[in-house]
Image (cartoon, rainbow, N blue to C red):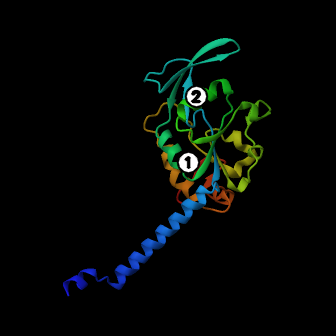
Amino acid sequence: SISKAQNYSSPKENKNKNMKAKNKKANSSLNSFRKKNNKKTLILDLDETLVHSGFHPFERKSDFIFNINIDGKEHTIYALKRPYVEEFLSEISLYYEVIIFTASIPEYASPLIDLLDKNKITSKRLYRKNCLFDNGLYLKDLKSIGKNLKDMIIIDNNPISYILNQENGIPILTWYEDVKDKELINLIPLLKYLSLVDDVRPVINKIVDQRNNTINFAL
C-alpha cells in the first residue's frame, strides 16, 4: 500500500539512523562525563593574551575603563579585549575548568577580570603573589594549583612564565591592538581535542616547538 511504502526504510537509511543514534548517545555520554566535574583545567594568562591595557587612552575606543588604587594613588586603566575573547571563554568552558593566572597584582587584575568575565566562567584567579620569583622573573608553577599535570594546559604569550611546566604549555602570539587577530578562535579545535586525551603532555610535546614557540596544527 501507499502508506507502507511511505513508512519503508531501506537498509542504508536504517544504518544511517543507527549511526546518528549512536553519535547522539556518545555525545550525551560525553556531556554527562563533563558535567560530573571531570573536566581538564585550562590556565590562561591575562595581559597580552586575553587583553591589553595601559595608563593612557588608545587610538581607538577602550573596551574597559576603570580606576584602581595602588599605595594610596589613584590610576585610570584603559583596556582592550583581544578579538573573540568572550566567544573563546564561553566555548572553552564547555570542555575545561578555566583559571586565570597572571603575574599582575590583584589590585589591577581582579577588577579587570570582573569586567572581562561577566558570566563568571573562570573558577579561580591566581596573581603575582602566587608566582615563583626567580632571577627577576615571575614563574607560574602549575604544581601549586594542586591538580594532576596530565590534565592541565597553560596558554601564555610569555613562554618563560611556564618554563617549569613546558610540556603543559601552549604559546600564543603577544597581542596589543590588532583587530584582525584570530589566535584565540584558532586554538579552539586543538583544545577540544586535548580535552579528550588521557594525558595532554605527549600531544603538546609533539605539536609545539618550544624553541620557536610555534604550533604545528598539521600533526
Residue that sits furthest to the bottom in the current view: 1
Q: Is residue 105 left or right of residue 172?
A: right
Residue type at mark 2? Leu
Using the image, determine if residue 66 lies above or below residue 32: above
Find numbered disc 2 in the image and state the secondary structure of the residue it sits on: helix
Locate the C terminus and report the quarter of the image it occupies.
bottom right
Using the image, determine if residue 27 lies above or below residue 99: below
Quickly name the residue at label 2.
Answer: 112
Quickly name the residue at label 1.
Answer: 93
Q: Nearer the viewer, residue 201 or 105?
A: 105
Q: Is residue 155 left or right of residue 80?
A: right
Using the image, determine if residue 14 lies above or below residue 103: below
- Residue at image coords 55%, 65%: 29
Q: Picture coordinates of residue 68 (x, y %)?
A: 61, 18
- Residue at image coords 36%, 82%: 12
- Residue at image coords 70%, 43%: 162
Q: Is residue 188 left or right of residue 12?
A: right
Residue type at mark 1? Ser
Looking at the rendering, which quadrant does residue 161 occupy?
A: top right
Find numbered disc 1 in the image and state the secondary structure of the residue it sits on: loop
Q: Picture coordinates of residue 101 (x, y %)?
A: 67, 38
Neighbour class for label 2 at 10 Å: few (<14), some, many (≥20)? many
